[in-house]
Structures are given as C-alpha cells and as structure tokens.
Image (cartoon, rainbow, N blue to C red):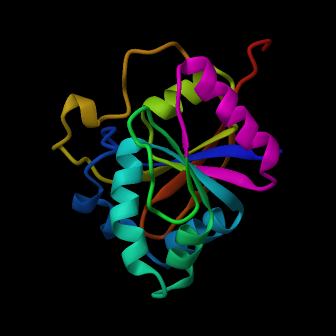
Amino acid sequence: MGRIVNATYMTLDGDITNMAAWHWDYFGPEAMASGKAQLDRSDALIMGRRTYDGFSASWPQRAGTDEFADRMNSIDKYVVSSTLKDPEWTNSHVISGDVDAVVAGVRAVKERTEGDILQYGFGDVTRLLLAHGLLDELRVWLHPVLSGKAKSEELIYRDTERANFTFNGSEVHSTGLVILSYVPAKAAQ
C-alpha cells in the first residue's frame, strides 16, 4: 500500500506560495539530492487543480532535460478536481465527485500504489487528506527567510480542525534549509 507524503516548501513566516522570490536562494546540491530521492521513492503524484495547472504547463516542456523532469513526467498523476475533465499531461487521472467519492478514490490509489504518493504544497487537498486520515507524512522544507510578502491566502495557516503530529526526523542543509518530517499522531494517543 502506498503512503501519501506531502512536501511543502515554506518560509519562516509561513509563505507557501511565492517560491520564485525565495526558494532558489536555498536550493543547493543537498536540496537537489533530497528532492530527487523523494521523487524517486514515489510512484505517483497527487494534487489539486491549481497545482496540476502549474505543473502541467511547465514539466512537459522540460522532458528530456534531466532525470528529475523525466521522472516527474513519467509517473502517474492524480488530480482532485471537479472541473478538469480531460487532462493532457501524460499519465494523469482525475479524482472527482463529492467528498465521499474523492476519499474513496484516494483510498483506491493508495491500495494500488506500492511506493510513495507525493504531494507538493499544502492546500485544500491536503486538508481533506488530513481530515480523513489519508496523509501519512508531512515534510516541511523550511527556508531561513521571512518573505514579508504573503497575503493571508498564501500562508499555510487556515482555520481548520486541530491536527497533531509526531516528529519523524530532519535534514539540515548547509544553505540553512531544514527539512522537517512529521507523521500524523493517531487519534487514540
């Protein structure tokens, strides 16, 4: 059974959206190796429509340029969307319907996937996964910068149900980037 692993790039002030302004200053060889290892352990991606639109507009253009791009383009991609009908990016599949249908669809993906199912970014799909016990690991790629530019909708914070996590490990890179790994705490604890 596959595990859903969320990888969220974030600043010290919680900005998860404006990566072009801060991410590349801290993305050195160590981060590239960590990112590649993370993707190599994954047999699929899961994402919402906005992430899909951004990824499908850029990754196919990079086909053949490096192993990372080729892996990104080749693995199965699952898009949670009520509006996307005919995805054009290779190996893309839509999970749609009401909440129960989406949860059942995600569970089916987990059942038939052996490796990790990687999700980039933290949004409505992540909150749905958390609420239904489907997220297996949260990796926060914490960048040592205050972006100072994020609007409230570009921050990781939202009013939501409390979710507790257990520390699962960390990586500290020479650029100051820290990858923090957490697993959701079980409700019984």
Left or right: 144, with 89 as reference point:
left
Residue 58 lies in quadrant:
bottom left
**Residue 104, magenta (yes or no):** yes
**Residue 27, magenta (yes or no):** no
User: What residue is at 40 percent from the left and 61 percent from the top?
Assistant: 56
Write the start and end of the magenta stretch as one range: 94-118
Image vertical order of residue 99 relative to residue 140, above or below: above
User: What residue is at 53 percent from the left and 70 percent from the top?
Assistant: 73
User: What residue is at 40 percent from the left and 60 percent from the top?
Assistant: 55
The one nearer the camera, 188 or 86, is 86
Left or right: 44, with 108 as reference point:
left
The one nearer the camera, 107 or 8, is 107
User: What residue is at 38 percent from the left and 33 percent from the top?
Assistant: 156
| Position in image of residue 8 (x %, y %) | 47, 47
Q: Residue reaching furthest bottom?
A: 65
The one nearer the camera, 100 or 84, is 84
Image vertical order of residue 88 relative to residue 28, above or below: above
- Is residue 171 something that shows in the picture? yes
Q: How many marks?
A: 0
Image vertical order of residue 14 relative to residue 172, above or below: above
| Position in image of residue 47 (x %, y %) | 50, 45
